[in-house]
């Protein structure tokens, strides 16, 4: 299959292009498109055969359910049921935006979307191209990240093509995504409510609306599709815990050790530490006090290390507050070590 590319300026959207993309969705094809978090791989959520193509293109296990994207808050009632005031308060506070809610599903939602569960994950993205596409397609769009399963999520159309060229109908190139990590997923069918995946909305912000929300787990059971190694570059990742000079000294020691042993390695460092590692291959995540910049760069930098063909990435940490929780979650999963519990 030939993958077409359509360049669209999100600030001046060519509606004919959106119609072209929407027609592909309507006829059961796959379109990758930008959202404010990462690029999504979209298919008509009410067409099981179209959704099956997502799993095939991404090489994604069928038990890993998809998030459904809508463009109008009212459409939540078409895909989910048992929607109480607290849900409406949450979506009023965070939609459109990087918050996914898990609710009981409506009958019409195909099992392939939910991995056979009675629940559905839904969000309304805060990106004009995504919203226009969903509106013009006149259907909810199922869209996981537009990468090969397990790889770092794509934050540019180029990343999408690296993984999926020839496997999907179209990529809309709308430039780099703003946030760079995926949405926060909160399960509203559990008591107490539970964050299944930290993301673009910080847990502190969520607690303003639902103070009782917990992080990650119920009875020690992970949510479906939460795999221990995920978001991973080809290189192994070694996370150096600690802070300040103690951390940079640890990074330096291990880098010298790897150097002596002849490993090809890189260092993922915060901006303020860029001069501490001499001539080693250092790539910068962003300033430690600018977690927004760090999140936006994360997946792109991991892919850049792959281009350098390093065997190991030695990674500094960022502070685990706000977006820093999502950044460290992705970095820990990319390293294959389960998330630290907070
Ligand atoms: P992504 O691959 O970024 O689109 O993430 C989708 C993730 O959302 C899945 O891997 C699941 O962990 C989560 N998810 C989707 N649907 C559900 C659901 N019905 N219940 C719980 N988690 C879900
Ligand atoms: Mg994904």
Image (cartoon, rainbow, N blue to C red):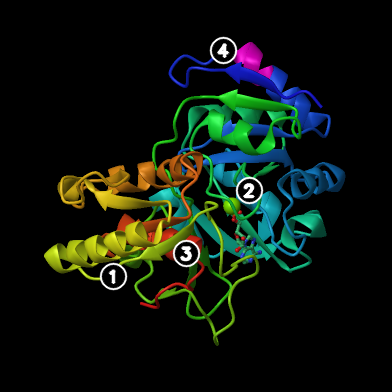
Cα–Cα span, label 3 and label 4: 41 Å
**Disc 3 residue crowd, few under 14, some 14–19, many 20+, Cα 10 Å:** many
Q: Disc number at residue 14?
A: 4
- The answer to whether any part of residue 254 appears in the image is yes
Across and down, in percent, residue 99 comes to: 47, 53
Q: Is residue 100 above or below residue 280?
A: below
Query: Counting residues from the N terminus, which is met first, the one under dot 1 or under dot 2?
Result: 2
Q: Disc 1 on helix, strand or loop?
A: loop
Q: Looking at the image, is mark 3 or mark 2 nearer the viewer?
A: 3
Front in this rendered view, residue 113 or 138: 113
Question: Between residues 110 and 170, which one lies in front from this camera angle?
Answer: 170
| Position of residue 273 in the picture relative to residue 73 (left or right) | left
Residue at the spot 69% in from the left edge and 53% down from the top edge: 79
Q: Which residue is mark 2?
A: 144
Q: Which residues are magenta?
A: 14-19
Query: What SS does tag 2 mark?
Result: loop
Name the image quarter holding the C terminus: bottom left
Quadrant in the picture for the N terminus: top right
Q: Residue at x 84, y 48 (%)?
A: 48
Examine the structure image and report whether residue 277 is included in the region drawn in magenta. no
Q: Nearer the viewer, residue 138 or 155?
A: 155
- Looking at the picture, how far across and down is residue 125, in whole percent? 51, 41
Residue at x 48%, y 38% (from the top left corner): 155
Q: Is residue 37 above or below residue 159?
A: below
Dominant SS in magenta: helix
Real-space CA distance between mark 3 and mark 2, rounded to the nearest whole angstrom: 21 Å
| Image disc number at residue 335 | 3
Which of pointers 1 and 4 indicates the residue nearer the eye? 1
- Kindly identify which residue carries mark 1: 241
């Amino acid at each position: 299959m030939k993958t077409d590319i359509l360049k669209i300026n999100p600030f001046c959207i060519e509606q004919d292009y959106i119609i072209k993309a929407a027609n592909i969705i309507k006829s059961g094809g796959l379109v990758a498109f930008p959202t404010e978090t990462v690029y999504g791989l979209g298919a008509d959520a009410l067409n099981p055969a179209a959704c099956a193509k997502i799993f095939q293109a991404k090489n994604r296990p069928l038990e890993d359910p998809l998030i459904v994207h809508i463009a109008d808050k009212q459409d939540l009632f078409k895909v989910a049921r048992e929607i109480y005031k607290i849900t409406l308060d949450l979506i009023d506070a965070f939609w459109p935006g990087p918050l996914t809610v898990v609710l009981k599903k409506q009958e019409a939602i195909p099992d392939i979307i939910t991995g056979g569960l009675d629940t559905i994950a839904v969000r309304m993205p805060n990106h004009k191209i995504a919203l226009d596409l969903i509106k013009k397609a006149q259907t909810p769009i199922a869209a996981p990240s537009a990468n090969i399963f397990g790889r770092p999520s794509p934050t540019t159309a180029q990343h999408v093509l690296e993984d999926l060229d020839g496997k999907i109908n179209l990529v809309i190139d709308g430039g780099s995504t703003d946030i760079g990590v995926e949405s926060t997923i909160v399960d509203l069918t559990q008591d107490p409510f539970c964050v299944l995946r930290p993301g673009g909305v910080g847990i502190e912000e969520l607690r303003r609306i639902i103070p009782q929300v917990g992080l990650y787990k119920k009875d020690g059971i992970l949510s479906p599709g939460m795999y221990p190694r995920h978001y991973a570059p080809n290189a192994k990742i070694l996370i150096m815990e600690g802070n300040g000079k103690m951390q940079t000294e640890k990074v330096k020691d291990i880098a010298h050790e790897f150097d002596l042993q002849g490993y090809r390695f890189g260092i993922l460092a915060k901006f303020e530490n860029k001069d501490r590692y001499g001539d080693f291959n250092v790539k910068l995540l962003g300033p430690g006090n600018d977690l927004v910049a760090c999140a936006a760069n994360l997946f792109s930098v991991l892919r850049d290390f792959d281009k350098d063909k390093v065997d190991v990435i030695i990674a500094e940490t960022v502070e685990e507050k706000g977006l820093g929780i999502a950044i460290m979650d992705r970095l820990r999963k990319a390293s294959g070590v389960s998330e630290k519990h907070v």
